[in-house]
Amino acid sequence: MSKENPQQSVMDLLKELGLSDKESLIYVALLKEGSAKAVTVARKTGINRTTVYDLFDSLIQRGLINKFKKKAAVYFNALEPKRLLTYLDREKEEKVKIIDSQKAKIEGLLPSFISLQNIATNKPKVMIFEGEKGMREAYEDTLNSKEIILAYANVVTMNEGLPNFFPQYYKRRADKKIFIKGIMPQNKTSIERAKFNQEEMREVRFLPLSYGDFSPEVNIYNNKMLVVSWKEKMALIIESRELVELQKIIFNILWGVLPRVTSE
């Protein structure tokens, strides 16, 4: 709390807790007065007396003030400031109840949500990721694979596109027991990486040198296809059973004609 203007600090906090400007003024006035009649609070705050009574009711409901009779007059006083903590606890409980109720409604209506979603399942879903951060996010999705990942990959362009990312990614994939088959161009870097095939749960086959090089990467898994363009710094995840099944057929045909790597 500011030593220069404690009242303003208190007012700012009260408004942050959800009290209106006028409610905050009345609460602070009662703190300073100890106890007071409505006419006194109206005079101290500049709020008309009818409004003061309405705001008294609001503050009583919040558990921050109370009222009592003294002879024939009605007085109001602010309860001790630590009651603000109790007020917050009640607010928290109410919000938790509301959220729990909303969650229960969502759970009850999940079949309806899913039935609406299924209307468009015949259309491929495409997600676009841009920049290094986006491409890393795209690779995270492959760690949800429930089957062997089929990949076209060039280790040279992968390391240039996301420096220092892949050694950790390989380890995390291996820790999740996700195996990968990779078709790679036959260059020095890819051959060196293949030496770690066993520990990184990978099998590779190299394209003949006569086929040349390629830059992008493609991962085929579940009903998805991750396509990464290293030159354009972007990635796509296409979710389509029909398209992915075709890509699996093409990959397996090529895999079947490429020679096995017997020593790495």
Image: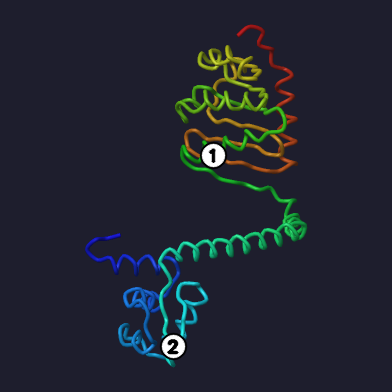
Residue placed most toward the observer, 188 or 59: 59
Which quadrant would the C terminus be assigned to in this image? top right
Helix, strand, or loop for circle 1? helix
Q: Along the horizontal axis of the image, is 132 left or right of 175?
A: left
Residue 248 vs 96, above or below: the answer is above
Q: Which of the 4 image quarters holds residue 150? A: top right
The residue that mark 2 highlights is 74
Residue 251 image offset from top left, x and y in percent: 70, 27
The residue that mark 1 highlights is 137
Residue 142 image offset from top left, x and y in percent: 62, 34
Question: In this view, which residue lies farthest toward the bottom?
Answer: 72
In the image, which is nearer the foreground, mark 1 or mark 2? 2
Question: What's the colour scheme?
Answer: rainbow
User: Tag 2: residue type?
Assistant: Val
How many labels were placed on the picture?
Answer: 2
Helix, strand, or loop for circle 2? strand
Residue placed most toward the observer, 50 or 165: 50
Residue 15 image offset from top left, x and y in percent: 40, 69
Q: Along the horizontal axis of the image, is 259 left or right of 191?
A: right
Question: In this view, which residue lies farthest toward the left?
Answer: 4
Residue placed most toward the observer, 158 or 60: 60
Q: Residues within 10 Å of mark 1 (few under 14, many from 20)?
A: some
Q: Along the horizontal axis of the image, is 201 left or right of 65?
A: right
Looking at marks 1 and 2 on the same chain, the residue that comes earlier in the sequence is marked by 2
Q: Residues within 10 Å of mark 2 (few under 14, many from 20)?
A: few
User: Tag 1: residue type?
Assistant: Glu
Q: State how far apart marks 1 and 2 are (Cα).
A: 64 Å
Residue at position x 49%, y 22% from top?
156
Residue 16 vs 24, above or below: the answer is above
Question: In this view, which residue lies farthest toward the front?
Answer: 71
Q: Which of the 4 image quarters holds residue 211? A: top right
